[in-house]
Amino acid sequence: MGKSSKDKRDAYYRLAKEQGWRARSAFKLLQLDEEFNLFEGVTRVVDLCAAPGSWSQVLSRVLIKGEKFGRSAWEDKERKDRLAVLKASVIKKSEQELQEPEGEVPEPLRPRENVKIVSIDLQPMSPLEGIITLQADITHPSTVPLLLKALDPESYDPSSTSAAHPVDLVISDGAPDVTGLHDLDIYVQSQLLWAALNLALCVLKPGGKFVAKIFRGKDVDLLFAQLKIVFERVRVAKPRSSRASSIEAFVVCEGFNPPKGFKASLDNPLGAAQKLPVDPEKPRERTKLYRRLREDGITELELGSDEEKEGEDVRWIAPFLACGDLSAYDADASYHLPKDRVSLDPVQPPTAPPYKRALEMRKKAGGAYGKTKGLI
């Protein structure tokens, strides 16, 4: 399939090239920020599974360069257009009278101070302005010391398992190479999310945010309940740029607040098999955890203590939100392209695609499966 046909089939693929983004996934992060205001007060960020770097590119342009996108950028443009029309219609008025009314002057774009962004991926990634890139495996414990050293090179302590200066936000757009076997893909994705969360626990500050891609499967409610243990608010979002036919969604966790006595450890990721200290002055509550399938087909997960009041609703369901303007492009629709349109090349071609070796073997064979070898 050529570039022109893909431009017609995927509007966000076309817009990404026109607006200078490395991948269409940049719109997903922008729409999540528009809904949850993720970047408010954020200066230190860790981007996991970052290649080819579209999410890191959004961080660079928003935090380092001070650019605006989405609704805020549209509002600034509307103010400028209104002022231009006003100046054109009232020529005789002095320049002082033509100044924009108070409260309507758009704020200048000011880069934030002391911004630190670290991007990690198993694949190599082309450099970005102001971004520290690491080529490492987030599922391996050796990546955590590398991350801590990149965040605080001057005050890094090799014996420490947490950041000296915690970060405000950890994001992850990672997903495995899908096989088409949904149960297997969902399981591998959950393990990737487990690794991302393990790194986040080591570097997040109290009240920090965590955003990661998930695959909505049969037992995803258990994942939400586990995230709710260490975060005050857990919500699930589906950006409009994400295809409706895809089972992907994004979990947005805010208010990082781990249980009292919890300590991130590389030996016991996420505190597996760890017993939290018990206050001797308070009676110990025996907790219960069970799952059952109701008659209507809903899986019910109960978390709580035996002393809960009767009739209290103990089942917790993560809110599901749709992000993005309804007037935006539909990711599943095809749009007509003008005849004089010229298809653009990708902003950043893949540095080390998984199909690179296959292309080299095909070229060596003289074409597709060697069919053109020896032909004039």
Image (cartoon, rainbow, N blue to C red):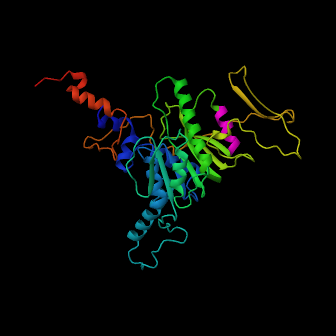
Please say whether residue 228 is one of the residues in the magenta stretch.
yes
Residues shaded magenta: 221-230
- Residue at 23 percent across and 30 percent down: it is 363
Question: Which quadrant of the structure image shows residue 237?
Answer: top right
Above or below residue 305? Residue 261 is below
Q: Residue at x 47, y 41 (%)?
A: 241
Q: Quadrant of residue 1?
A: top left
Q: Position of residue 69 (x, y in %)?
A: 47, 54
Q: Name, please, the residue furthest toward the front.
A: 159
- Looking at this view, name the residue that lies furthest to the left: 376
Q: Is residue 357 left or right of residue 207?
A: left
Say if residue 37 shows up in the picture: no
Q: In front here: 201 or 268? A: 268
Where's residue 59, x and y in %? 48, 54
Percent position (x, y) of residue 7? 34, 38
Of 181 and 281, which appears nearest the observer?
281
Q: Residue at x 83, y 34 (%)?
A: 286
| Lateral position of residue 299 relative to residue 100, left or right | right
| Looking at the image, residue 259 lies above or below residue 5 | below
The mark total stands at 0
Q: Which part of the image, by quadrant, shows the C terminus?
A: top left
Residue 317 vs 86, above or below: the answer is above
Q: In the rendered image, is residue 274 in sight? A: yes
Q: Is 367 part of what is drawn in magenta?
A: no
Q: Residue 338: x, y in percent?
A: 29, 41
Question: Which SS type dominates the magenta stretch?
Answer: helix
